[in-house]
Amino acid sequence: MYARDSRCLPTFAAKTSAGLAGFITLRQHFPEAWEVHCIAVPEHERGKGVGTILLNYTESWLAEQGVRFLQVKTIAASSPDPNYAATRAFYLNRGYIPVEEFPLLWSPSNPVLLLIKAIDQCTADSR
Ligand SMILES: CC(C)(COP(=O)(O)OP(=O)(O)OC[C@H]1O[C@@H](n2cnc3c(N)ncnc32)[C@H](O)[C@@H]1OP(=O)(O)O)[C@@H](O)C(=O)NCCC(=O)NCCS
């Protein structure tokens, strides 16, 4: 689904000389409110700053268009999956604020945490 969506939704890719190092796909809900639809970095590239670069680039690209809020949904802490603890830490350390947990939005075994960040308009020309 994410591969298909990346063909029709705004998507940025990070590349190294070795090839694709990650991508981010975005959805617009309203002109001033967008969502990170998907962000992923291959396992061997994680922890090197690629995800941060993708988010920073996205935030400044959105700021240029006057976007005020970027939200992301991920798996909530009420899930025992340890992988998503690292994902939540990634967002928290980059200024995303937990807003609400939705236990049944995706499925009972995949409780959702909604996080949101106010886009700093001063980042518009910092890419
Ligand atoms: C979340 C993800 C996009 C972060 O990308 P990244 O390139 O590893 O992130 P960076 O190197 O810029 O930042 C590393 C930070 O992310 C955290 N992190 C999250 N998952 C990590 C992982 N698997 N390996 C290393 N660091 C990870 C680290 O704790 C680190 O935090 P800190 O810098 O605040 O101390 C990436 O780990 C990933 O693709 N994970 C699997 C897919 C996923 O969960 N996507 C989001 C779904 S909502």
Image (cartoon, rainbow, N blue to C red):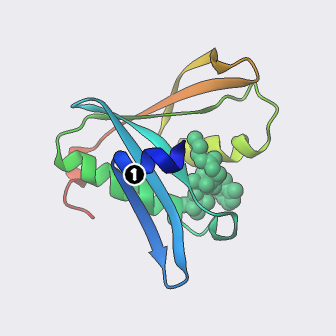
Q: In front here: 85 or 10?
A: 10
Q: Position of residue 65 (x, y in %)?
A: 17, 44
Side (left or right) of 49 relative to 86:
left
Image: 26 above or below 80: below
> For residue 81, which quarter of the picture?
top right
Residue found at x 38% / y 59%: 12
Mark 1: amino acid: Arg
> For residue 46, which quarter of the picture?
bottom right
Asked if residue 91 can be seen in this view, the reply is yes
In which quadrant is the N terminus drawn? top right
In which quadrant is the C terminus drawn? bottom left
Image: 103 above or below 46: above
Q: Position of residue 22 (x, y in %)?
A: 52, 63
Q: Position of residue 3 (x, y in %)?
A: 51, 50
Q: Position of residue 77 (x, y in %)?
A: 72, 29
For disc 1, does the CB lie below 8 Å from ligand 1?
no
Side (left or right) of 38 relative to 30:
right
Q: Which residue is most to the bottom?
A: 17
The residue where tag 1 is placed is: 7
Residue found at x 77% / y 28%: 79
Ligand 1 placement by image quarter = bottom right
> For residue 80, which quarter of the picture?
top right
Image: 42 above or below 58: below
Asked if residue 94 can be seen in this view, the reply is no
Number of other residues with Cα within 10 Å of mark 1, as a class: few under 14, some 14 to 19, many 20 or more: few
Side (left or right) of 59 relative to 24:
left
Q: Which residue is most to the right?
A: 80
Residue found at x 48% / y 38%: 96
Q: Secondary structure at mark 1?
A: helix
